[in-house]
């Protein structure tokens, strides 16, 4: 597996397995199948409600802890009268306990909402204590990312953002590179939206390589040095999504895919006040 080197020297596999929207009672089997297929990088979140099932699969696999790269995410913490920093540590400990681990490879702020500066300060401590080998953020637009960097000690190692052929984030990636932040894609297939799997441009490129559209999309992201964490509950797709290191897209093919960019989210806008309020109202730790 190819790795990227994060800004603190930690090695992160460029391809991993995401578990968003896998029901809790199916997650253990899916993660066991993913580990058996060869995935060693797992991406979950407190808000997915399936950390314990991910932990059970890790335990059942018998794979050595140091051979795995495990990410989870901190939900927006609410402590109107208390300390968001204390709550962040508690939320971290809860995630660790559910996962059955004694440290994380990567801990991310899930949303740029609420008092995420206090959350970040608690995460800096967790990082210094060795409890989270790397810390980062998710869904941060460039302005919020730069502000967080400029007013804190540790630069986020990663920003996990929606990135796929219809929302490519080229300018965001350039800024992150300048600031030493690794881009990680969520929704590499846009969850199939916009008919991604039958898109004519992607299909023609896939046919030219004897590969699937999913493999072309993952290859395109990896060639752009974007970390990917595709999700599937089907073992044959898990294997297919891992099998992307034996071919390369030409510059001309990369250019044809670049032309598919719409520059907009296919999901929702993190700057929409109704969405900010809805996300902020969810209570998870
Ligand atoms: N930070 C955030 O806010 C955030 C938001 C969303 C996602 N994420 C992370 O990113 C991961 C990936 O994103 P995602 O799960 O939203 O969507 P995704 O990976 O873009 O798409 C998953 C969908 O593609 C299908 N699929 C997978 N492989 C396929 C293949 N080879 N051929 C055809 N269809 C295929 C899956 O169906 P089957 O399962 O039926 O195969 C599923 O419907 C998540 O699991 C999560 O870890 C993070």
Image: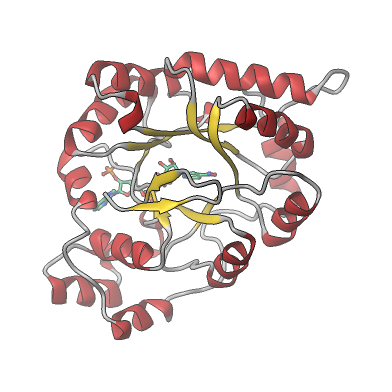
Q: Position of residue 200 (x, y in %)?
A: 27, 76
Residue 114 appears anywhere in the view: no
Say which residue appears at 45% left-offset and 52% top-offset. Answer: 5
Tell me: 172 left or right of 77: left
Q: Position of residue 249 (x, y in %)?
A: 26, 75
Tell me: 118 left or right of 16: right
Quadrant position of residue 197: bottom left
Say which residue appears at 32% left-offset and 83% top-offset. Answer: 251
Q: Position of residue 214 (x, y in %)?
A: 26, 59
Q: Quadrant of the C terminus?
A: top right
Is 62 situated above or below 17? above
Quadrant position of residue 243: bottom left
Say which residue appears at 73% left-offset and 58% top-offset. Answer: 146
Is 144 situated above or below 276? below
Q: Nearer the viewer, residue 231 or 12?
A: 12
Q: How many numbered marks appear?
A: 0
Say which residue appears at 23% left-offset and 19% top-offset. Answer: 62
């Amino acid at each position: 597996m190819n790795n990227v080197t994060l800004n603190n020297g930690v090695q992160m596999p460029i391809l991993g397995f995401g578990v968003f929207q896998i029901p809790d009672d199916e997650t253990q089997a899916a993660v066991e199948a993913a580990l058996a297929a060869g995935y060693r990088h797992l991406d979950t979140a407190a808000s997915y409600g399936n950390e314990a099932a991910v932990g059970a699969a890790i335990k059942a696999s018998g794979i050595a802890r140091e051979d795995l790269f495990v990410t989870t995410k901190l939900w927006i913490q609410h402590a109107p009268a208390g300390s968001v920093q204390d709550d962040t540590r508690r939320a971290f400990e809860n995630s660790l306990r559910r996962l059955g681990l004694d440290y994380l490879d990567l801990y991310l702020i899930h949303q740029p909402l609420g008092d995420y500066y206090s959350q970040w300060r608690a995460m800096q401590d967790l990082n210094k204590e060795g409890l989270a080998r790397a810390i980062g953020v998710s869904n941060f637009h460039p302005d919020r990312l730069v502000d967080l960097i400029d007013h804190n000690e540790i630069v986020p190692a990663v920003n996990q953002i929606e990135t796929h052929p219809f929302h490519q984030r080229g300018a965001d990636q350039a800024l992150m590179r300048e600031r030493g932040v690794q881009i990680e894609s969520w929704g590499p297939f846009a969850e199939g939206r916009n008919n991604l799997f039958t898109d004519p441009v992607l299909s023609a490129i896939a046919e030219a390589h004897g590969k699937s559209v999913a493999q072309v999309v993952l290859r395109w992201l990896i060639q752009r040095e974007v970390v990917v964490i595709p999700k599937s509950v089907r073992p044959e797709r898990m294997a297919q999504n891992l099998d992307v290191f034996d071919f390369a897209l030409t510059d001309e093919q990369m250019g044809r895919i670049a032309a598919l960019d719409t520059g907009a989210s296919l999901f929702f806008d993190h700057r929409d006040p109704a969405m900010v309020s809805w996300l902020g109202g969810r209570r998870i730790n």
